[in-house]
Image (cartoon, coloured by chain):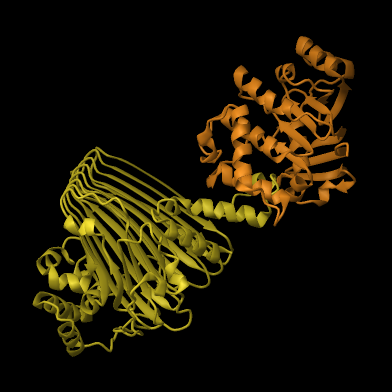
Amino acid sequence: MAGSTLEIKDLHVEIEGQEILKGVNLTIKGGEFHAVMGPNGTGKSTLASAIMGHPKYEITKGSIILDGEDVLEMEVDERARAGLFLAMQYPSEISGVTNSDFLRSSINAKRGEGNEIPLMQFIKEMDATMDLLEMDKNMAQRYLNEGFSGGEKKRNEILQLMMLKPAIAILDEIDSGLDIDALKVVSKGINQMRSDEFGCLIITHYQRLLNYITPDHVHVMMQGRIVKSGGPELAERLEAEGYDWIKKELGIEDETVGQEA
Amino acid sequence: MTVETQLPYDRQYVSQYTDGRGEPEWMKNLRLKALEEAETLPMPKPEKTRINNWNFTQFKHDVKGEEIASLDELPEKIRVFVDQGKTGKNLIIQRNHTIAYQSLSEDLKKKGVIFTDLLTAVKEHSDLVEKYYMKDAVKVHENRLTALHAALLNGGVFLYVPKNVVIEEPIQVIFWQEDDEAALYNHVLLVADTGSQVTYVENYISHNTEKESVANIVSEVIANDQARVSYGAVDNFARGTTAYVNRRGVAYRDAKIEWALGQMNDGNTISENLTNLMGDNSYADAKSVSVGRGSQSQNFVAKIVHYGKHSEGYILQHGVMKDQASSIFNGIGKIEHGASKSNAEQESRVLMLSSGARGDANPILLIDEDDVTAGHAASVGRVDPIQLYYLMSRGITQKEAERLIIHGFLAPVVREIPIEAVKEQLTQVIEGKVH
């Protein structure tokens, strides 16, 4: 099998009555890394949250299809079990639930009853992955994200990504708040996921992440739409020249769509 | 409707009962005086909880239980509370009003530790018990129920830890109300002498879902200078038992008392946990969790009073409410004049699982001294939808995600329970109650 396909068609999304996404079209296949770039407030994070099913976002038009299945008909947990993953910009803190118990529950939710991951195998995998991400071992027994620094939370999201091995992952500003060393470590983890079985959508407004993770496709988002697509050279030009030339080219004055949640 | 407290147990009954047990004169006098006082004393008045139709009078006072020679003779539902081979060496099992099983390690006996049922203690260590029993912590005449407690006392244990003795292994007691109608007028007296350390864990268990009974429980913890007491409890009376629980500690200079209370009764309950920080540098940490379900009504008070300078008090109350259950959580931090440099902190949180339930968190700080620090946090709310979303985004079902959040919410007490078997049972009780 050559990996999954996520097709987003004419997606319109509202939050509290305000339309943020105004017709997004995007297809991500196994083996492909896509980057969605754009200034703040253009709808990038809304796209990520809408795909995963965040309760605050309402889809008013369009479709999201994963391997022929209607994602919009699925509950959040069903989307995850179908193969989607979102590394969140602001992961929740959950007191009293240890990181390792949470991860094991997540893995077992996907594997299903009667097919739970053997404890020793889980511990080995978790140890190895934490080593790769240069995470302190005691983070396994700490409560989920509670008191984690910004950088620790991001690493923890990538730990989950690597342990859950989704078909399609969306990384929402995984680089924000990371210093250069942490950025390298996180990128190493993401690059290790690369295979024909894994597709990835990287949302960022800095080009610097793309110095470490080379995307196959780059998309620029403005006013709640993808306004320009290209290859890795597009990201380089944005790094060198900023977004103004695109705005000029397309006749856009204000690229935002109100607040970005 | 007036409170029906006319008991079928009179002066003659109490006299015969105490004589029958061969109790010393002081105990008999204390009982009889208490019985007299009970007639005129008012019932306790828990804030915002009506108790006038609760059962305080229907019960059997004296019920024998079968003794056992080994723990293997216990039914499975009780045996699961004991870590066999590990912590089960210092253990008392009280079955109805009989001590069914009792053991204390030779090592602790040699060190002078006394760990025995209260009846034996009043006979064999009469002076020591008399010195502390209902004197410095709970007083007989506080209300009608404390007086009735003193009058009708029919169970309990005495634990005395001599000067500078440090007990590593937890001491465990199981109070098992096996007979559906047996009432526990149960008293725990724990005295930790200067510089001693002890960890104590108790379980209250009954299975009377239909028949009615009463539990009237008083615990007194005396932590003398520099003593450290960790007190863990899992209350698990079934629906038929109306419970009055009064756990109180007194901490003297440099002493430390830590409470971890799993308040899992299914019947109507008043439960008060008070620590008096008498000495300078004394410390109290009072953690409690509870689950309310069905139509039960509960009233919880967690209170720490600071008298000593530099004293520290921390209160944490977490409650989960479902069905039509109703609970009041009062957290009270009181700093008396002169208790300078003291710190009183508290946190009360209530998680509502159904719209028919009621939960009130009332944080109260009463401060009569300028040079102190204090703080409180209180909240009543539902499971956070964003937390649910986060857990579900990893493939966890909504039901399982809620389960994780609820167990996490109650973890502050569960993780403090030092006996694995009891911790496991508390987790299972929570599991059974919230799902």
Q: Residue at x 79, y 31 (%)?
A: A200
For residue A252, what is the image quadrant?
Answer: top right
Is B319 situated above or below A80? below
Quarter of the image with the C terminus of chain B in it: bottom right
Q: Picture coordinates of residue B207 (x, y %)?
A: 45, 76
Q: Is residue A9 visible?
A: no
Taking the image as shown, residue B306 lies to the left or right of residue A48, namely left
Q: Picture coordinates of residue B4 (x, y %)?
A: 33, 84
B184 or B8, which lies in front? Answer: B184
State which chain is coloured yellow. Answer: B
Q: Residue at x 28, y 89 (%)?
A: B8
B177 or A220, which lies in front? Answer: B177
**Which color was chain A given?**
orange
Taking the image as shown, residue B208 lies to the left or right of residue A4, namely left
For residue B73, what is the image quadrant?
Answer: bottom left
Q: Picture coordinates of residue B211 (x, y %)?
A: 44, 84
Is A110 situated above or below B292? above
